[in-house]
Image (cartoon, rainbow, N blue to C red):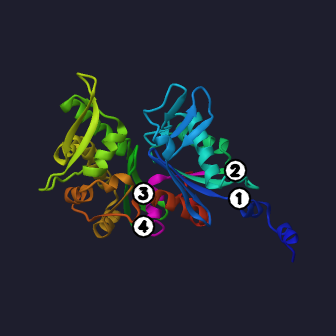
Amino acid sequence: MNFKRMLSFLPARRLFNFFSNDMAIDLGTANTLVFVRDKGIVLDEPSVVAVRAGTTQVLAAGKKAKEMLGKTPESIVAERPMRDGVIANFEMTESMLRYFIREANNNRMTLVSPRMIIGVPSGITQVERRAVEDSAKQAGAREVYTIMEPMAAAIGAGLPVHEPVGSMILDIGGGTTEVAVTSLKDVVFCRSIRVGGDEMDRAIAQYVKRKYNLLIGERTAEKVKISIGTVLVDKEEQRHQVKGRDMVTGVPRTIMLSSTEVNESLLETVANIVDVVRVALENTPPELSSDLVDFGIVMAGGGSLLQGLDKLISRETGLPVRIAKDPLLCVVNGAGRALEELDFFRDALMK
């Protein structure tokens, strides 16, 4: 049977699927990751876009655009269009998505527009969810499905979400922290707070401003967090050089920030994360709670890598806590698996 005749026997839907590069997207506050069916993760870039002022002409996106943050002339606007896990600037998000989709396709045109599964925060409103769907369709999607990020993270972390067993996932992203208890391909209880890695960066910057009268940017604060950020202070203190602008003299100045000081700056943010875990445990049905005693809590997202956070949560809850393998990739891998096994995971998608 020749190729043309073979295609004539395929139903229209299967024909579309045959020619389209279907995608799963983790449209995160900090990073955007794209998973293409049968290829895996093909793009992992910061959620930053730079455009010419007054237009939607994309000059750079991802890593190149992130390097421009806070350093652009008036003719160029570089910003993060996602805030707290949702779209803050619709046009910029659409431009960024279109750019990333083209990059994921190696700048080649596809015969059929792709289907997309996009991870969104569980606390997203209908208006915010519609904005995500519309943005994806404007960027070239044929069909758009959404999946709760904690559910996607649970699938990506390899938890038995399809079984009648309670599993708890704690996903700490750039803009949100979400905790969910899953069973039988659905979420039994979920709570989302708009606190995450970005809030940690702001807390460090505010601490330095308050204590040293020194202004530092979010990128500098992020480097401090990654380098010496910790929840449980070790005996051996670490230090990190921080450069910023003196608020009194207006000239550049350098200080040495200690891990103890960073720990102090993060106390309130970490307390909010621990509290949301407690709320989830208090609202988990007894039968599923007994499962958590055995299986514990699995952490995903970039915030899970904060030194000592898993040990602190374990100490506060009395449950075993472990960090998922490749925590930064859990959401996109889970959404990608749902894309490749769409019929099986259809119940896990948002209705």
Residue occupied by mark 1: 20
Instruction: State left or right for residue 33 relative to residue 194.
Output: right
Query: Rounded to the nearest whole Å, what is the CA distance between mark 3 and mark 1?
Result: 27 Å
Viewer-nearest residue: 17 or 123: 17
Q: Amino acid at mark 4?
A: Leu
Q: Position of residue 113 (x, y in %)?
A: 71, 52
Of circles 4 and 3, which is in front?
3
Q: Amino acid at mark 1?
A: Ser
Whether residue 154 appears in magenta in the rendering, the answer is yes
Q: Position of residue 282 (x, y in %)?
A: 29, 53
Q: Position of residue 153 (x, y in %)?
A: 44, 58
Q: Amino acid at mark 2?
A: Arg
Whether residue 196 appears in magenta in the rendering, the answer is no
Dot 3: element: helix
Q: Amino acid at mark 3?
A: Leu
Precedes in sequence: disc 1 or disc 2:
1
> Relative to residue 326, is residue 57 depicted above or below?
above
The range drawn in magenta is: 144-164
Precedes in sequence: disc 4 or disc 3:
4
Circles 1 and 2: CB distance less than 8 Å? yes
- In the image, what residue occupies the spot 29% across and 53% down? 306
Residue occupied by mark 2: 142
Which quadrant of the view contains residue 150?
bottom left
Precedes in sequence: disc 4 or disc 1:
1
Query: Rounded to the nearest whole Å, what is the CA distance between mark 4 and mark 3?
Result: 16 Å
Query: Rounded to the nearest whole Å, what is the CA distance between mark 2 and mark 4?
Result: 30 Å
